[in-house]
Image: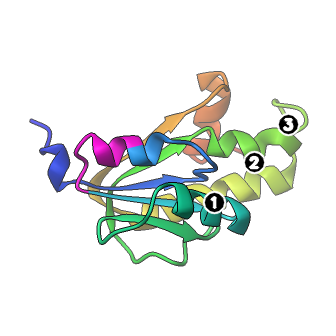
Amino acid sequence: PAPPKASLSVLLVGCGNSTLSPSMFADGYGSVTSVDYSSTCIESMKKLYPENDNFKWVLGDMTDLKEFGDEQFDVVVDKAAMDAIMVEEGDVWNPSPSVVAAARSMCRAISRVLKVGGVHMQVSFAQPHFRRKYLLGMHGGED
């Protein structure tokens, strides 16, 4: 059985101005942290939805997540954040090396901050067979 949501620590990467984080916290998730690289966005969201010990807005880069420790979160949610990286993808069959590298960095960072047995949930507009290659490190030259 799944653990009770009140016991879960959740990280939302590339949060933007989405209300998903405050909605999850209001719905009873124990700890919700949102990260985005836009200082304007983070400051705006802090004003709209004030922080407390279990609800945070963090300025940071989802491709390194250096603001967080190893195995810190039970759940990492990507609600179209990787889609933003894919804007420069080019040919889906032969994507830009810089996009492959950025997606690889993002996946590695998420894996690092997830607890053992944690869940990475991704919501995307991409077709699954294209996105799966990024999530599973199946693009040529990846280690």
Q: Which mark sits nearer the N-terminus, 1 or 3?
A: 1
Measured in 3D between alpha carbons, the distance from the residue under mark 3 to the one under mark 2, in whole angstroms, is 15 Å
Quarter of the image where one finds residue 43: bottom right
Q: Which residues are magenta?
A: 23-30
Residue located at (30% from left, 52% from top): 118
Tell which of 15 and 91 is nearer to you.
15
Which callout, 3 or 2, points to the residue nearer the camera?
2
Image location of residue 99, percent across then percent down: 80, 51
Image location of residue 124, percent across then percent down: 60, 30
The residue under label 2 is 85
Amino acid type, residue under disc 3 in the picture:
Asn
Q: Is residue 68 above or below residue 128?
A: below
Residue located at (60% from left, 71% from top): 59
Instruction: Tell me if residue 143 can be seen.
Output: no
Residue located at (56% from left, 55% from top): 107
Residue at disc 2, secondary structure: helix
Q: Is residue 2 above or below residue 106?
A: above
Q: Is residue 61 above or below residue 9?
A: below
Image location of residue 111, percent across then percent down: 45, 60
Residue located at (19% from left, 45% from top): 5
Q: Residues within 10 Å of mark 3 (few under 14, many from 20)?
A: few
Quarter of the image where one finds residue 127: top right
The residue under label 1 is 44
Q: Which mark is residue 94?
A: 3
